[in-house]
């Protein structure tokens, strides 16, 4: 593989630890990383990260939220609280081995709004759902995870066609929302991408900082096998949603190296 001399820039908790209270500062601190990505392109940047293969080795198969603050395992918004029937089916299909909830869950807040419930109790609804899903499917409810900051700092959403992608296992990967497209039908995955767009472009994310010049990046993580969920196929799948986003959201492909 050609080495384009990618300079590793720290991301995630270590990268952000001195900027927890400032959305503006978080954005500015990520600028050098995204300038590199813009200079060399998404595919080239990602494939030249040292040990990028490790990003396709899940440490567990726990079901988590799509939230960038809950990396690892597999993902549905609010651990499936907005698509409960699909979540029940996904657990055995994806060989899920545990269910997580987390504090400050935007999907749980969406659920509360839709159900006419107290949004201030959203975390409790998220916990209740995760425990219910665990009980119904016979897997453990693992934990209610605390998050490292009260806002969304992701500038990337990963539309993962491999079902193996883990954002926090390789230094230099931008933190991002993860949609486990591999285990969802196209419409369900697109619904989740719509939720990501609402959160990232809204008051709990970087909001108006996303512009046509600095858009939210949707990275279609595709299978190397041409018969699978290739990045090209996934980009076609998300193309209409991208068109509806007024150029504040842009799609790029990345093919898994393994």
Image (cartoon, helix red, strand yellow):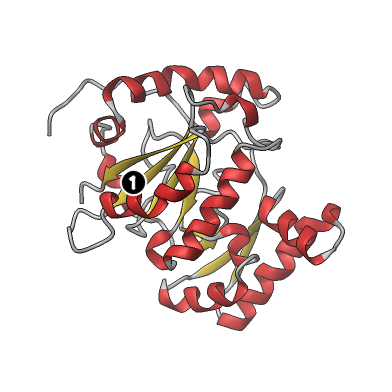
In the rendered image, is residue 62 in sight?
no
Residue 6, picture quadrant:
top left
- Looking at the rendered structure, the secondary structure element under dot 1 is helix
Which of 80 and 148 lies nearest the eye of the viewer? 80
Residue 157: x %, y % from top left: 47, 43
117 horizontally vs 131: left or right: right
Residue 71: x %, y % from top left: 50, 48
At x 33% / y 46%, what residue is drawn? 55
Which of 235 and 182 lies nearest the eye of the viewer? 235
At x 48% / y 48%, what residue is drawn? 241
Give the vertical position of 163 relative to 31 (above or below): below
225 horizontally vs 151: left or right: left
Give the vertical position of 128 relative to 56 (above or below): below
At x 31% / y 19%, what residue is drawn? 39
210 horizontally vs 123: left or right: left
Residue 217, picture quadrant:
top left
Give the vertical position of 198 relative to 34 (above or below): below
Give the vertical position of 94 relative to 170 (above or below): below
Number of numbered tags placed on the structure image: 1
Residue 158: x %, y % from top left: 43, 46
The image quadrant where one finds the N terminus is top left
Q: Residue furthest left?
A: 1
Residue 161, picture quadrant:
bottom left
231 horizontally vs 14: left or right: left
Residue ID for mark 1: 55
Mark 1 neighbour class, 10 Å CA radius: few under 14, some 14 to 19, many 20 or more: many
At x 31% / y 42%, what residue is drawn? 253
In the rendered image, is residue 16 in sight?
yes
């Amino acid at each position: 593989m050609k080495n384009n001399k990618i300079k590793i820039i720290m991301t995630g908790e270590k990268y952000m630890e001195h900027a927890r209270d400032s959305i503006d500062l978080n954005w500015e601190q990520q600028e050098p990383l995204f300038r590199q990505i813009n200079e060399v392109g998404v595919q080239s940047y990602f494939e030249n990260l040292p040990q990028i293969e490790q990003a396709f080795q899940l440490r567990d198969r726990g079901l988590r939220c799509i939230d960038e603050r809950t990396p690892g395992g597999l993902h549905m918004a609010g651990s499936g609280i907005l698509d409960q029937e699909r979540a029940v089916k996904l657990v055995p299909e994806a060989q899920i081995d545990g269910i997580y909830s987390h504090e400050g869950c935007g999907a749980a807040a969406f659920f509360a709004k839709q159900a006419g419930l107290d949004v201030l109790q959203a975390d409790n609804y998220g916990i209740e759902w995760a425990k219910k899903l665990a009980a119904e499917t016979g897997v453990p409810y693992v934990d209610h995870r605390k998050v490292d900051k009260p806002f969304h700092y992701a500038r990337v959403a990963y539309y993962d066609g491999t079902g193996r992608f883990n954002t926090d296992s390789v230094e230099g990967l931008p933190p991002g929302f993860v949609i486990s497209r591999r285990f969802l039908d196209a419409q369900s995955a697109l619904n989740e991408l719509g939720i990501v767009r609402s959160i990232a472009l809204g008051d709990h994310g970087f909001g108006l900082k996303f512009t046509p010049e600095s858009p939210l990046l949707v990275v279609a993580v595709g299978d190397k096998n041409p018969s699978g969920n290739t990045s090209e196929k996934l980009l076609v799948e998300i193309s209409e949603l991208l068109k509806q986003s007024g150029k504040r959201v842009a799609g790029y492909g990345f093919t898994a190296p393994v």
